[in-house]
Image (spheres, rainbow, N blue to C red):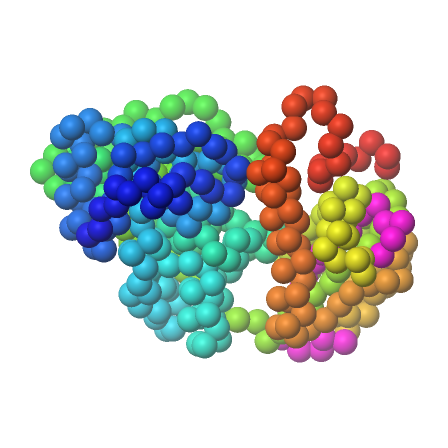
Amino acid sequence: MLKKTDPDTIKTYLEDSSGLSGGSAEAVYIPENETEVSNILKELNSTNTPVTISGGGTGVTGGRMPFGGVVLSTERLNKIIDIDQEKLIAIVQPGITLDELNEALKERHLIYPPDPTEKTAFLGGTVSTNASGARGLQFGQTRKYVVSLNVIFSNGERLEIERGRIFANKNILRLPLKNREINLRLPHYRMPEIKNSAGYYVKEDMDLIDLFIGQEGTLGVITQITLKIAPAPEGTLSFFSFFKYYRDALGFVQDAKKNGACSLEFMDENSINLLRKKFPNLPKDIKASIVFEEDYKENADAIFDKWAKLLEIHNASEDIWTGDTERTRRDFKNLRHSLPEMVNEIIRRFGFPKIGADIAVPQNNFLEM
């Protein structure tokens, strides 16, 4: 275990992609195994010292920002324990990045389906936030793929949680610890039907494991994760399409959902104009862009023709970027990911805009439809 108290070293843990500032911490603890995590938490719990869990720092809500107490970083809990190609599961520690997992799976012609956007994010962070990416349209959020978790609580107690073993009885959820049992009374709020990661997951007769997916380190430290994985598709067709009017772009989205798209991302005029500073080859006089993909096993030409006709029906610009190579997908992802990076840079430089401020940052504004 490492313990860092040097102010300059601590400073690197007082920031994430949110641009939030003003954090402070007395020390940073960096455990290398579950026993060390347990001992650290037990010690800090005995002195009522606040603990903030630190992952990869890619979050945009300030969740890893400490305001006093200490930081517990999962950066050295970074092993891929096993990839089982027959059972289609991967067992990993929370400090493994999505990039590292994807590279290991790629060698075996496998994928991690939810494919959250930020590739340098830690897997522990994606589970703690129930993350998802563009391919969530077809594959859903992280929650669907978590088979089991090891969690260590603030007093050092450890619990292995396996999906399908413990369910809530009415509004009571049983937490079976080593020498005792805790009955948790669930709140009565109703989860929205739309994609949402705010608050603790609550559902009648819910699975215990779902309480710890999306809890952002507030209930315990995740030290091991078992995930579902899947065979990789034969190929993927990727499209970067452009529209002069929002109504055409949104009309295309409605039809694309019915025609096999596994991902759909919308960019408005402000987003495109911001990206154009870095990518001057983006078409001019464009109001919206739709980036989408479809996986295929065979007959890619027929799939391409289907999308070409649908784009024509919805008056898409003739300047459509497309490809079916890994390089094309990577280039498209790099372009798309440049957008949040540029927005974050604006926030870092100028702060969050005040209400009513006139600042041309990306927004979902369909008033000109």
Q: Nearer the viewer, residue 75 or 225?
A: 75
Q: Magenta segment, which residues? A: 283-301
Q: Position of residue 357 (x, y in %)?
A: 72, 25
Q: Which image quadrant for residue 65? A: top left
Q: Which residue corresponds to the image point at 72% horizontal and 71% vertical from the top-left? A: 323
Vertical arrangement, residue 89 with respect to residue 33, above or below: below
Residue at 63% over, 33% down: 350
Question: Does the image show residue 168?
Answer: no
Which quadrant holds the C terminus?
Answer: top right
- Picture quarter containing residue 52? top left
Query: Relative to 143, is 105 above or below?
Result: below
Residue pictured at 34% horizontal, 70% vertical: 84
Q: Position of residue 25 (x, y in %)?
A: 31, 34
Residue extending furthest toward the left: 179
- Tell me if residue 143 comes above or below residue 85 in the rendering: above
Q: Position of residue 80 (x, y in %)?
A: 33, 65
Near-viewer residue (162 or 247): 247
Decide if residue 308 is on the left or right side of residue 217: right
Q: Nearer the viewer, residue 85 or 331?
A: 331
How many discs appear?
0
Residue 225 lies, in percent from the top left, at 33, 54
Give the residue at x 53% y 49%. 132
